[in-house]
Image (tube, rainbow, N blue to C red):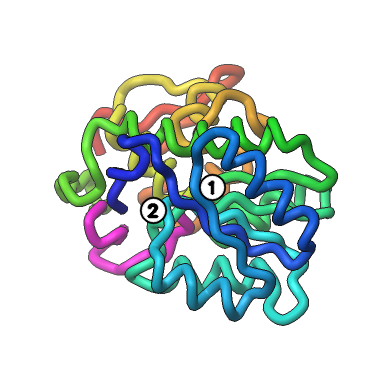
Amino acid sequence: MSVHHLIENTMNILIIEDDHDIAELIAYNLKQEKINSEICPNGALGLNKAKKLLPDLIILDLMLPDIEGLEISRLLKQDQKTKHIPILMLTAKSEEIDRIVGFEVGADDYLTKPFSPRELVLRVKAIARRLKDEPQSQAEKQPASFGLLSIDPQKFEVRVNNKEIKLTAIEFKLLEYLLSTKGRVATRDILLDRVWGYYAAITTRTVDTTVKRLREKIGEAGDYIETIRGIGYRFKERP
């Protein structure tokens, strides 16, 4: 995804939220930070706008009147044009399983209602900062292979034994980061910062859950990810 808006400090954000007051509150607080936004009051309109505008970030309510937010996220992540757009989910559900499901379908961050507008702005900025600070754009990253595993950042594609494996955005970022730092131990807090976008925004248990799910998906290649008890994880130096 192009990050020129982020670099120029003129982010464009799409707010998909049916509660008019909440949407206006979000837009107002973003405007105070010189961040542009557009509001869509339902899922169908939001999907169309996302494909047309290709915003830098989508703030997505999960409880919409026409299409559930989780389904919208799935559809966006399946579309080649929109799958790299970060998604910040908003929901009244606060259980950890709800957050995990959100990340499973491609959320980059997750905020429960009621929320602090200031915290929302900080989370938006954190996602922008992560994208801006990446040493290479996704289009510049080169394919890599390790034993049975191959990863192509440009195609957002992972293969094990030449069989394509479907990963969520977070799982892909986690695998990509661990592979790029193979041989080095990554603490759970570092993974929260580098993969999810900012320090300790969610619990370290979510990291463990995501690693477990990633290992299951990549099968035999899951053995390449080692658990360093009490510290974090490490990708093997050699297959």
* 112 lies above or below 58: above
* 213 lies above or below 235: below
Earlier-in-chain disc, 2 versus 1: 1
Kind of residue at disc 1: Asp
Describe residue 222's horizontal placement relative to residue 113 as left or right: left
Crowding at mark 1 (Cα within 10 Å: few <14, some 14-19, many 20+)? many
Kind of residue at disc 2: Glu
Residue occupying the point 51% across, 32% down: 126
Q: CA distance from mark 2 to mark 1?
A: 27 Å
Crowding at mark 2 (Cα within 10 Å: few <14, some 14-19, many 20+)? few
Q: Tell me if label 2 and label 1 are in contact, CB under 8 Å.
A: no
Residue occupying the point 32% across, 36% down: 8
Residue occupying the point 63% across, 59% down: 60
The answer to whether residue 220 is magenta is no
The answer to whether residue 160 is magenta is yes
Q: Which residues are magenta?
A: 151-169
Give the residue number, with chain letter if any, for mark 2: 220
Q: Position of residue 165 (x, y in %)?
A: 38, 64
Give the residue number, with chain letter if any, for mark 1: 108
Towards the viewer: 161 or 5:
5
Q: Is residue 34 visible?
A: yes
Q: Is residue 214 visible?
A: no
Q: Quadrant of the C terminus?
A: top left
Q: Position of residue 52 (x, y in %)?
A: 40, 72
Q: Position of residue 125 (x, y in %)?
A: 51, 33
